[in-house]
Image: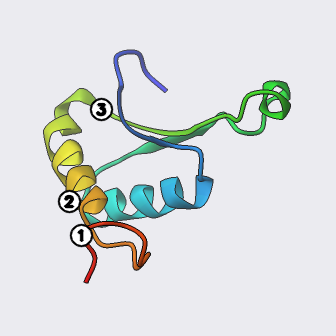
Amino acid sequence: MEKDWVKVFSSDRSYEAEIVKGMLIDNGLNPVLVNKQSSPWAQALPGQAEIYVHPSEETMAVTLVKDHNNLPTGDPNETGNA
């Protein structure tokens, strides 16, 4: 990965990061997923799965991630869900 890539998403749930990565790819972006969960430190401190994009794709990626984060989860305990 080149220098100066921008982190646009992180989660302690790798499956969610994979979903977001797929959404970004579906929208024509080229994200890179860095999974820091499979490190020796993961036993004591849970790692994060992080998604990076090239700076030229940052604006679109941030908008898409915000839209993703505003989707209802289906959790009846979460506020804002019908």
Crowding around mark 3 (Cα neighbors within 10 Å: few <14, some 14 to 19, many 20+) is some
Q: How many marks are shown on the rendered structure? A: 3
Crowding around mark 2 (Cα neighbors within 10 Å: few <14, some 14 to 19, many 20+) is few
The residue that disc 2 covers is 67
The residue that disc 1 covers is 80
Question: Residue 8, relative to residue 71: is it above or below?
Answer: above
Rendered location of residue 56, percent (x, y): 18, 32
Q: Is residue 73 left or right of residue 38?
A: left
Q: Amino acid at mark 1?
A: Gly
- Ranked by sequence position, the earlier of labels 1 and 3 is 3
Q: 75 or 52: nearer the eye?
A: 75
- Ranked by sequence position, the earlier of labels 2 and 1 is 2
Q: Quadrant location of the C terminus? A: bottom left
Q: Is residue 26 left or right of residue 60?
A: right
Separation (CA) of disc 3 from disc 2? 19 Å
Q: Is residue 32 left or right of residue 82?
A: right
